[in-house]
Image (cartoon, rainbow, N blue to C red):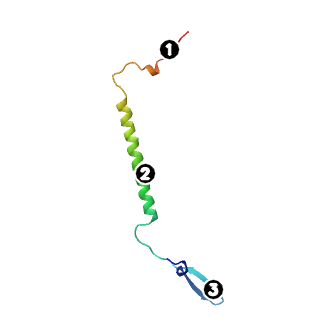
Amino acid sequence: MDPARDYTVKSTRSTIRMERQTVKSYGFGWRHLQLFLVFCAVSMSYCLRSNLSICIVEMTNANATEFPSAAVRFEQ
């Protein structure tokens, strides 16, 4: 769009003022693109969080009774 065509000149008595014309735009805009990208980011974050919790549960051994990493050894 040409910026010079966005304005109309109106003269009223001794004053000349320029008013911006409002142009109605329809369709897919920047805010829709941003909303879509935020939706994708939140969806991916949720999928990664749930996948990570499932992986942590699968990495543990439910039948183990000893935990060598948590054992406390007192040496003198």
Q: Which residue is mark 1?
A: 73
Amino acid type indicated by mark 3: Ile
What secondary structure is found at the residue carrying circle 2? helix
Please, which residue is most extreme toward the bottom here? 13
Q: Is residue 29 left or right of residue 4?
A: left
Which residue shows up at 41% across the image and 54% down it? Answer: 39
Please, which residue is most extreme toward the front here? 2
Q: Which residue is mark 2?
A: 41
What secondary structure is found at the residue carrying circle 1? loop
How far separated are the C-alphas under marks 1 and 3?
89 Å
Which residue shows up at 39% across the image and 49% down it? Answer: 43
Q: Which residue is mark 3?
A: 16
How far separated are the C-alphas under marks 2 and 1?
46 Å
Question: Can you say whether 1 is above or below 59 in the image?
Answer: below
Q: Nearer the viewer, mark 3 or mark 2?
A: 2
Q: Nearer the viewer, mark 1 or mark 3?
A: 1
Image coords of residue 4 (percent x, y): 55, 80
Amino acid type indicated by mark 2: Ala
Please, which residue is most extreme toward the left here? 63
